[in-house]
Image: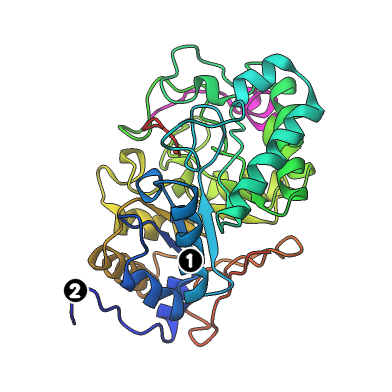
Amino acid sequence: MQATTLPPAEGLRAEVRATLMPGFPGLEAPEWIRDALRDGLRSVCIYGENVRDAAQLRALGRSLREARPDALVAIDEEGGEVTRLHYVDGAPYPGAAVLGRIDDLEYTAEVGARVARAVRSAGASLVLAPDADVNANPRNPVIGTRSFSSDPERAAAHVAAWVRGAQAAGVAACPKHFPGHGDTAQDSHLALPVVGVAPEVLAQRELVPFRSAIAAGAQTVMSSHILLPRIDPDAPATFSRTILQGILREQLGFDGVVVSDALDMRGASGEIGIPAAAARALAAGCDLLCIGPGTTPAQFVEIEDRILAAIEAGSSRPCACATPPPGFARSRRPSRRSPRRRSTVSPRRPRRATR
């Protein structure tokens, strides 16, 4: 097999491929990405390294959709200091902290709609925003001004407004980083943060904006790579069925798409590698696995192979999938019991810490 040639998406591999959302290097989509989109891959993510200017970004979006017209193209666009669309010159709309300080919900909804229109014009259909974290720790090195507020109710109101504005403009929103990254003192890009929050505090503080986002109709939610030992001492949120199934799905009633935060982050893969992280995230209940920027075809195949091996070994457990929101069909996690069923996914950062 040549370095740029992927195995054909047949049988269970087709289901696995439908759960992956790789990035890629460069300003143009590599041919292997386009080939993968023609053969089972449903989603890709655009990062700052893929953006030069608006015209180039539109051309990139067209190229991806030529390969697969129903491709789910994601982009990380929070506004403020976390931007992909305006990676070179900065976002023209305010970020969450400014919106929370202004405290005008109609304006927040309009900013969400403006971001969504810009995302659509670039050919994307999923915006990895807004940040739904409550800024509970002033020493947090990665959230800070990405949060609407340190007050849970104010943050919740603005998260819901942003979600409604963005989705009314035709883009799926993705509140993050479940169940809440606002009380960390470490950056999960660089390490695995440990947060000793009690379950009752989590419910009264971190979960409040996510409840509001779900009530506002958020079609996706992004998990976080943080360990909460008083809730699940054995697994970070992205790898925790207790958190993703028990809290997000059962307690909060979320029936949309669970997207992992980027698995290249050290909080997820620093000790086990990206392929093992992908298998664990899928087993825990993630539906769409954000791999991270600069994915190579060799890495992509290694991830697929590791997930297939985990399924065969029984460590990646089959899991019933809830009905997705209208207009956004989320991929079914691969099941050993249904290897012939093909999965479907259809569409309905300038600092480092941007996912």
Q: Position of residue 185 (x, y in %)?
A: 41, 19
Image-quadrant location for residue 130? top right
Q: Which residue is mark 1?
A: 19
Q: Amino acid at mark 1?
A: Thr
As rendered, which of 319 and 89 lies closer to the eye?
89
As rendered, which of 310 and 64 lies closer to the eye?
64
Q: Position of residue 231 (x, y in %)?
A: 53, 34
Q: Which type of secondary structure does the marked residue at label 2 adopt? A: loop
Residue at the limit of the structure toward the top, as seen here: 138
Stretch in magenta = 193-208
Name the mark nearer the viewer: 2 or 1: 2
**Alpha carbon of mark 2 to alpha carbon of mark 1: how far?**
22 Å
Q: Is 276 positioned to the left or the right of 206 in the image? A: left
In percent of the image, x 53 and y 59: which residue is there? 73
In percent of the image, x 62 and y 32: which residue is there? 132
Q: Position of residue 167 (x, y in %)?
A: 73, 49
Q: Quadrant of the N terminus?
A: bottom left
Q: Amino acid at mark 2?
A: Ala
